[in-house]
Amino acid sequence: MPEQMSFNPRDPYAFDYLLGRDLGAIKGNHTLNHQLPQGREFENKDYSGSFSYNAEELLNPSSELSRRYPQVSQVLRDRLGLAFAKRNNEEFSRCNCRDDSGHRCDSEVFQKHACSSYDDFIRLSSEGKTTAKAVCLCPDLLKRVQIYGFIGAGTFGATFIAREKGAAGASLEDLEQYAIKSQVHTTQWMDRLSGVDSQMAPFREPSGETRYMPEEALLLIYLDESKRFPRLNSVYTHGMLTAILMAPCVDPSYEAISIIDESHFDRIKSKGPIPPRIRTRYPPFPAFDGRYLMSETKEPQLGEIEGSKIASQLLQAMIELADMKVYHADISVTNYLMDQNLNVQLIDLGILQFSLNNAYTFDIDHFIPYQEYQMMPERAIELEKYDSWRDPSHDDVGIESIYLTVDQRQICLWKYSTIVYGFLHGFWPWDEPKPVPKSLDWHAMYNGPYNDPFYPVVKRRRKRIINEDATISESLSQDCRDVLQTTLSREKSERPSLEELSTFPWFSRWSAEELESGRPLKRPFVKKFHDKNRADGRRGFPWPSISVDQDMSFPILQSPGYNSSDSSGSSSGSSSSAYYSTYSDKSDDSGYEKVLPLQEASP
């Protein structure tokens, strides 16, 4: 006899009640403590390529590392000081739950001697693993927020949208909104045994306590003042999961809460204690990412001025990372988001490259097969020499490796240039410009198996990459063509560095256009995207525009009744004055930097 309940189906807390009733058994924090095997002590590891460990030393102005790299040290100390001041020295890592031995999961003792239990997590079906990333989070976090939507899932984590749980009777539109990135937590002990770089990094909180958190969250702390990245709220590390709370860049319309069907839960319970597809209870809240700037008709969705705005803001994001000697190693069409005024945020900092002495060159090139649209000429040449894609033993490989000397900075800029070319043309460089049936739209999803029917098409494109220059639309200005021609040059020596690229005049065109028109750039298709994805059937954007004058560039929910596509704020400021940069591409072979006078950003 199913349990009878009486509740309002639009009650934002009813869903949590049902999850707690059916899934309470898998919310525990069970851990095992281990001693490191002899010869695997942490202090023997080379941390020269770790941002988190070097940042800790660079924050000390009297350290040897700070004296060698004073500019990087100054940038980190300034940024961290601002982040602490804005939070009134409130801690970032907040899960206070203890394991069986009484240690927090973000403590050094736990990280170096414990592993979390995967038993309950593995019991879930492949469809249910995404749901587990929502329902198995820290109880302290689940008491604080209510997850009500699904944004998307990547290789290592899933992202949900949530709201703060207010007092009884509080209106939903007044509650703070969050994007929660939940991913499997592996301790330093587990990563050490696996021979991989540690996911969790040490960070000294304002209280003086050292806590461990994902390196992505650590970077967001140093980027707290930036408008080109999500703003970090807090981190909860609990058992097998770690959750990063950030400001959302999706449509957080409170009216999109799904109707709760109690019979659905009864059907799930009849099949076992662990729901395999409870994920369907989270309605989708898609983010407006770079995929929506591409077109099946292979026609550009943006004008050149609008493209200049997106390109310059992405460039700004890369420069702000380079100030800390960091490069984003996974820039892709899905890893940047936009609001209705085409203000950009770069996301997914889980894969990065860091080096204080510009040691970004490697002898082996690792790349993801299905990102064929970002194929580089030198990589295509090597693949032609020995056709590794056609080796049947490689069919199940997620990341390919070939012997090729590569500079990670050049790879980052190449990926960036393919994205810029894509939204200015509507198709990727070296693609056939004519539309093709959707079943033959291979450029983004081809993954290189031996018997892939699209493989001959891929081969022909690679030969064009090797032998032909990328075709650039004649309708684009010469300044724009200069950017594309140099960044997409088949000769590596002709491609500009990040510092050189930032001097190209094309990147300032959008700010001059907005200044002249007096309103921010936007396109009708952006509004159509939000209209299409609003579950409540209403039209228009659910949030007002946020201007630089308000010191925010990401959308927040202030008035759910806002129903106009017109902007209520001014545009973002000029890319040349919106951030303070000390970045330089010049070689650090001597190991020391020349200190330049600090300058304040323009108002």
Image (cartoon, helix red, strand yellow):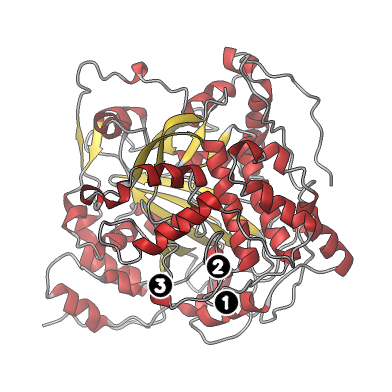
Image height of 90 relative to 582, above or below: below
Q: Is residue 102 left or right of residue 523?
A: left
- For residue 530, which numbered disc appears in the image? 1
Amino acid type shown at disc 3: Leu
Q: Residues within 10 Å of mark 1 (few under 14, many from 20)?
A: many
- For residue 288, which numbered disc appears in the image? 2
Image height of 237 relative to 270, above or below: above
Mark earlier in primary sequence (1, 2)? 2
- For residue 440, which numbered disc appears in the image? 3
* Count of labels in the image: 3
In the rendering, at what x and y percent does residue 146 appear? 42, 65
Q: Is residue 18 left or right of residue 25?
A: right
State whether residue 231 appears in this view. Answer: no
Q: Please report contact status of discs 1 and 2: CB closer than 8 Å, yes or no.
A: yes
Q: Residues within 10 Å of mark 3 (few under 14, many from 20)?
A: few
In the rendering, at what x and y percent does residue 240 appear? 28, 46
Label 3 or label 1, whichever lies nearer to me, is 3
Helix, strand or loop at mark 1: helix
Would you identify the image quadrant in which residue 422 lies? bottom right
